[in-house]
Amino acid sequence: MPKRKQSPKKSGSEAVAEPQPLVPSSALEPLRPVVLSRFIEAVRNGVNAALDLADAAADALTKGLRKGA
């Protein structure tokens, strides 16, 4: 059976090594504005599509009411 590695323990002046993140935060900094702008663009496109749908529905209703009157 393979032996497990033991985690480093504090003893005297020795400090436990902190685990390092997989991707340093400095590497993520340039990506954040891009991701945010893409999210805002997606929300804007969704709102525009909803407004187009509402406009088409309102147009269909008004045309239907004009024919019925």
Image (cartoon, rainbow, N blue to C red):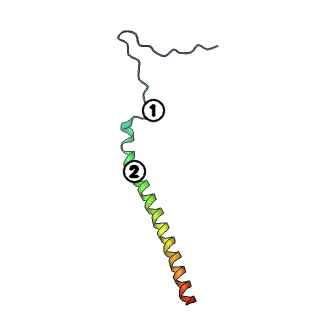
Q: CA distance from mark 1 to mark 2?
A: 21 Å
**Residue 20 placement (x, y as % from top left):** 42, 28
Task: Identify the residue under disc 2.
Answer: 34
Which image quadrant: the C terminus?
bottom right
Label 1 SS: loop
**Residue 14 placement (x, y as % from top left):** 37, 12
Q: Tell me which residue sits at (45%, 67%) in the image.
A: 48
Characterize the local packing of mark 1: few (<14), some (14-19) or many (20 or more) Cα atoms within 10 angstroms.
few
Return the disc, 1 or 2, that comes first in the chain's sequence.
Answer: 1
Please identify the residue farthest to the bottom as the structure is shown: 69
Label 2 SS: helix
* Label ID, residue 22: 1
Answer with left or right where residue 7 lies relative to residue 26: right
Q: Is residue 56 above or below residue 20?
A: below
Camera-side residue of 14 and 67: 67
**Residue 46 placement (x, y as % from top left):** 48, 62
Disc 1 residue type (three-letter): Leu
Q: Is residue 56 above or below residue 21?
A: below
Q: Are marks 1 and 2 in contact (CB under 8 Å)?
A: no
Which image quadrant: the N terminus?
top right
